[in-house]
Image: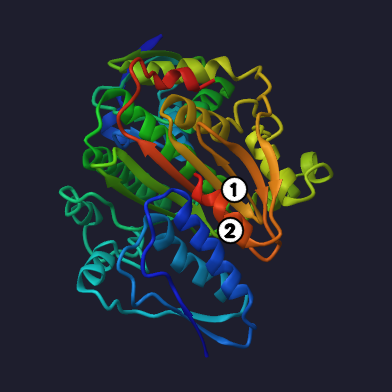
Amino acid sequence: MTYSEIKIGDILPLTLDTRESASRLVDIIKKEGECRVELDFANIIFMSRSFADQFHKELYSCDHNIDISIKNADLGILNMLRAVSNTQNARQAIKKNYQLVSFNNLSKLEDFTFSW
Amino acid sequence: MKNIELPDRISDNFGDPIQKIFDLIEGISNCCIEDEIVLDYSNAKFTHVFYSIALPLLVKIYSRRGYNIRLLGHFGYPSVESYMKTIKFPDGLDPLYFDGDVTECLDQYRNKSYIPIIYFPTGAEVHVTEIRDTFLSSVNRLLVHICGLQKEMVTALMYLVDEAVNNVLHHAKDDKGYLFAQYFKSKGYVDLVVADIGQTLLDTYASFDKHKNEVTNHQLAMEAALAGKSTKSLDVDRGFGISTSKSLLTKGLNGKYFIYSGNVFNIHTSEINTITSLPETISWQGVFLALRIPVVPTPGFDPSKYYE
């Protein structure tokens, strides 16, 4: 198996914000073919949940045999990747803890908005 | 001509600018579509982030509906005129149409307490996504710099911004999303808006067979969005953005979260969490998200605790 290194900071912005940027990264990884790919996150400040989710989905849906290792990622990025991988197959129900309210006119609403 | 005089001052109470947006929508909807409507903001002495970005968006919403509506373009107070010009009110900063280096333009705000009004493109074409991703990254980093954030708060702010922006990108079905923010150092928070004037939450759920028979009004759509019901049937992780963002902001940071779509809004603070229905005419076409984000974290704050 061949070995390849991709410096994320050279190809994407320093904050990994959107699903589209994740798709671009996975496209680049797939072009490496069947190999071990080291992703170097040096200088990367942040990874959004959307990026992590799209990255996870596209990478693990591909047919290539790609072995990924993570280098120089700060704890926030590792935590995000872990959190997203934990939610790929199951999710807990979100508890309803809100109150339902309605107003027929805005004058009564004013006291309510003032209290925020 | 119907002249609607806009408020000369808006307090920093979280609800006041929002109430004034509701008042304005009511005022416009009480006009006839044949009227020439002028929104007169010339007497403004104190503006607010939430209101300043809502104004041009309301003009767009009602223009699309066929109303003849415009904003009066000058301000009587020089300080307000200068501020509004600097934040690029009302046309915003759009990287697709900016004449010059947009990164250099953003650098001019590094010593300010606010960013300009941002109009970000939502298109899926490769060249658009590349421009947008680079631009949004610069905006995110500018915000972090302005607020002087470190470590966990960098992650928290970017998480909140990116979840909101990604919701616009994937649900609004409109050509632009909108973002604006200002940091209030003496008060210890940043007020941030991410908004669109595309599909409402109800429009989004109604366009998917999975939900269209159970989500039939704006209140049910809001409840579904807060419950994290994704419109993507196979994507278990999709639909976490709103719930985790609310939890991170309100429980983790003691901040305030307001989301408004159609004639329904949710206000969530450490004290209240209500879904409120308004009269049908008091309606936002799209989604309007307003956040008050404290910048000093509570001891032991760890944003990753709120990801799942």
Left or right of residue B38: residue B113: left
The colour scheme is rainbow
User: Most extreme residue toward the bottom, as rendered?
Assistant: B1
- Give coordinates of residue B170: x percent, y percent: 56, 45
- Residue marked by disc 1: B171
Residue B64 seen in render: no
Q: Which mark is residue B188?
A: none
Residue B258 seen in render: yes
Report how far apart the C-alphas of labels 2 and 1 lie in the structure.
8 Å
Mark 1 element type: helix
Indicate whether B266 appears above or below B21: above
Q: Chain of mark 2?
A: B
Which quarter of the image is occupied by the N terminus of chain A?
top left
Three-letter code, disc 1: His
What residue lies at 28% left-to-right and 42% top-to-bottom? B143
Q: Chain of mark 1?
A: B
Q: Earlier in the sequence, mark 2 or mark 1?
A: 1
Indicate whether B21 appears above or below B122: below
**Pick the front one: B185 or B166:** B185
**Pick the front one: A79 or B57:** B57
Mark 2 element type: loop
Contact check, label 2 and label 1, Cβ < 8 Å:
yes
Three-letter code, disc 2: Gly
What residue lies at 31% left-to-right and 33% top-to-bottom? B295
10 Å crowding of disc 1: few (<14), some (14-19), many (20+): many
- Give coordinates of residue A106: x percent, y percent: 62, 61
